[in-house]
Image (cartoon, rainbow, N blue to C red):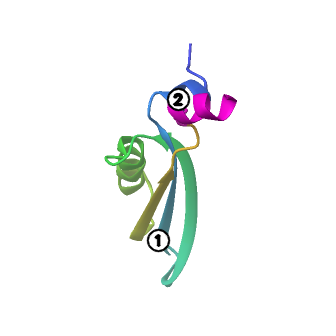
């Protein structure tokens, strides 16, 4: 059974976007952009690295550059209990 995205995010994974610029195999003077999103662990990004390893082994297009960004969509709630109690009185 696979975990839901919410459970994975609560476990520390972040929505991660990898922007890959690569040379088109038939037109090596042109660059093409490929965007890929997944949930991954920052700062090591093991899923992104696995994806790029697959790309290098199986896809003819040569990578020019990769930009990775990540944003945690879900985080534990942070409450200031003293402020909450003071506001109630």
User: Is residue 65 placed above or below 4 in the rendered structure?
Assistant: below
Q: Is residue 26 visible?
A: yes
Quadrant of the frame with the C terminus:
top right
View extreme (front): residue = 89
Residue 78: x and y in percent read: 52, 35
Question: At 31% from the left edge and 46% from the top edge, which residue is drawn?
Answer: 44
View extreme (top): residue = 1
Question: At 68% from the left edge and 29% from the top edge, which residue is drawn?
Answer: 88
Quadrant of the frame with the N terminus:
top right
User: Is residue 89 placed above or below 1 in the rendered structure?
Assistant: below
Mark 2 / mark 1, whichever is N-terminal: 1
What stretch of residues is rendered in magenta? 75-89
Question: At 37% from the left edge and 44% from the top edge, which residue is drawn?
Answer: 50
User: Is residue 51 placed above or below 24 in the rendered structure?
Assistant: above
User: Is residue 12 placed above or below 43 in the rendered structure?
Assistant: above
**Numbered disc in front, either 2 or 1:** 2
Residue 88 sits inside the magenta stretch: yes
SS for dot 1: strand
Gap between marks 2 and 1, in whole Å? Answer: 51 Å
Residue tagged 2 = 81
SS for dot 2: helix
Residue tagged 1 = 22
Residue 27: x and y in percent read: 52, 81
View extreme (right): residue = 88
View extreme (left): residue = 44
């Amino acid at each position: 059974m696979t975990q839901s995205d919410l459970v994975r995010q609560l476990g520390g994974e972040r929505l991660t976007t990898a922007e890959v610029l690569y040379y088109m195999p038939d037109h090596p003077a042109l660059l093409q952009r490929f965007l890929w999103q997944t949930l991954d662990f920052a700062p090591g990004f093991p899923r992104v690295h696995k994806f790029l390893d697959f790309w290098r082994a199986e896809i003819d297009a040569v990578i020019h550059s990769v930009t990775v960004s990540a944003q945690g969509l879900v985080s534990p709630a942070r409450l200031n209990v003293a402020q909450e109690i003071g506001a109630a009185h």
